[in-house]
Image (tube, rainbow, N blue to C red):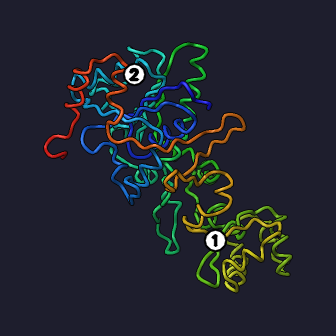
Amino acid sequence: MKLEGLRVIDLSQFLPGPQLTLMMADHGAEVIKIEPPGEGEPNRHIGPAIGGHTVFFRNTHRGKQSVCLDLKTVAGREALLKLAETADVFIEAFRPGVVDRLGVGYAAVSARNPRIVYCSISAFGQTGPYRDIPAHDLATEALAGLVSLNIGQDGEPTMPHVPVADMAASLLAFGGIMMALYRRVQTGKGDFVDISMHDAALSCTPNITGQVFAHGRAPTVKHERSLGGGAFYNIYRTKDGRHIVLGAQELKFVRNLLGEFGRLDLVPLCERGPGPHQQPLIDFLRGRFAERTRDEWVEWFRGKDIGFAPVKDLREAFDDPQADARGMRLRDADGHEHIGTPVKFRDEPGEPRFALPSVGEHTHAVLRALGYSVDTIGSIEAAARPRDGGK
């Protein structure tokens, strides 16, 4: 696999960092998850569980090792630094300054291993007036303007539902780390990668900043090409209360559908581009699509050269034959479902490993390999055990 031989230390929690290291583990990297004493990674306890693990944890931590260290102790901190001497990549996702206070920031780690690629993922990055503000995905999306683009039928902003900032930050971190590793081949030196979820959210807007950069104003959402201002990039309710979408605005698709409906006279509305002048066409299509059920429209569109799709719920999406064909829904030996790995290679494809670690399961083995004595390991493990009933 592409990343065999790469050792990654993952000090992050929740979604962006664990998702990043999951992609690396799926492609052969050795990922060592550093978990805090007590309950460990929060994903272990969030959401529905099956087979002894939450689905959230299963989808972000398969194929990783777990080492439990108390970084507030000298021995725990030194163990992590000694481990970092053997690693290629170090990932953390605390608020800026936390790892420095713990003694495991970039300066301390790179002093022990100048080849390390150290990646910090945070809400607002290591610089700027917001760097110390606590925030998760929703707040960074709100400040980046994305929430203002998610307008419901009542005209009010609605929840984005998909963690765009989290996932975009994860992917950008993945790319940044790969670039730094590539550069290290030439220079022999690692680097510090500073990833901001807010930056990541802003970077997702190249197709909707036209009004912002050209005219200095926020877009009128319902008039924008990709936000509902075009009849052929829109959502329509069907007879059974479900929905379909038209998802391609090229005029050839417009003519193909309106020709089928005998309404080529409406094509000029699309030739003028998106905006309120398309409302008569939107109204016409709403009326037509309300005449049949969602699945009846699926059959009607079959074989036609028109950008169309049924709106599927998430259960239907993972049951779709396309997801299976592309390996995006996997099952382990116990039949538990997993999200597949999206990065495909013709040679050396990823091979997800479904084993899930218990908290600290690999502490002894990893520290023993670093040369620690059994007695010292016992002391480090004892310091990392839950105290006060695990609270």
Residue sitting at the far left: 388
Residue drawn at the location 53% of the way across and 60% of the way down: 149
Q: Is residue 186 left or right of residue 163?
A: right
Tell me whether circle 1 and circle 2 mark residues in contact (CB < 8 Å).
Answer: no
Name the amino acid type tagged 1: Ile
In the picture, residue 346 is in which quadrant? top right
Residue drawn at the location 62% of the way across and 54% of the way down: 208
Name the amino acid type tagged 2: Ala
**Residue for badge 2:** 84
Q: Measure how far apart labels 1 and 2 are at the Cα level.
A: 50 Å
Disc nearer the start of the sequence (1/2) = 2
Q: Nearer the viewer, residue 30 or 165?
A: 30
Q: Kindly tell me whether residue 108 is visible in this rendering.
A: no
Q: Kindly tell me whether residue 154 is visible in this rendering.
A: yes
In the picture, residue 87 is in which quadrant? top left
Q: Position of residue 313 (x, y in %)?
A: 56, 68
Residue drawn at the location 64% of the way across and 85% of the way down: 239
Q: Label 2's element? A: helix
Is 322 located above or below residue 381 in the figure?
A: below
Q: Nearer the viewer, residue 188 or 369?
A: 369
Q: Position of residue 53 (x, y in %)?
A: 38, 52
**Residue for badge 1:** 235
Q: Is residue 92 left or right of residue 338?
A: left
Q: Residues within 10 Å of mark 2 (few under 14, many from 20)?
A: many
Q: Which mark is residue 156?
A: none
Q: Residues within 10 Å of mark 1 (few under 14, many from 20)?
A: some
Q: Position of residue 281 (x, y in %)?
A: 73, 77
Q: Position of residue 327 (x, y in %)?
A: 63, 51
Q: Label 1's element? A: strand
Is 205 located above or below residue 306 in the figure?
A: above
Is 252 located above or below residue 295 in the figure?
A: above
Label 1 vs label 2, nearer the camera: 2
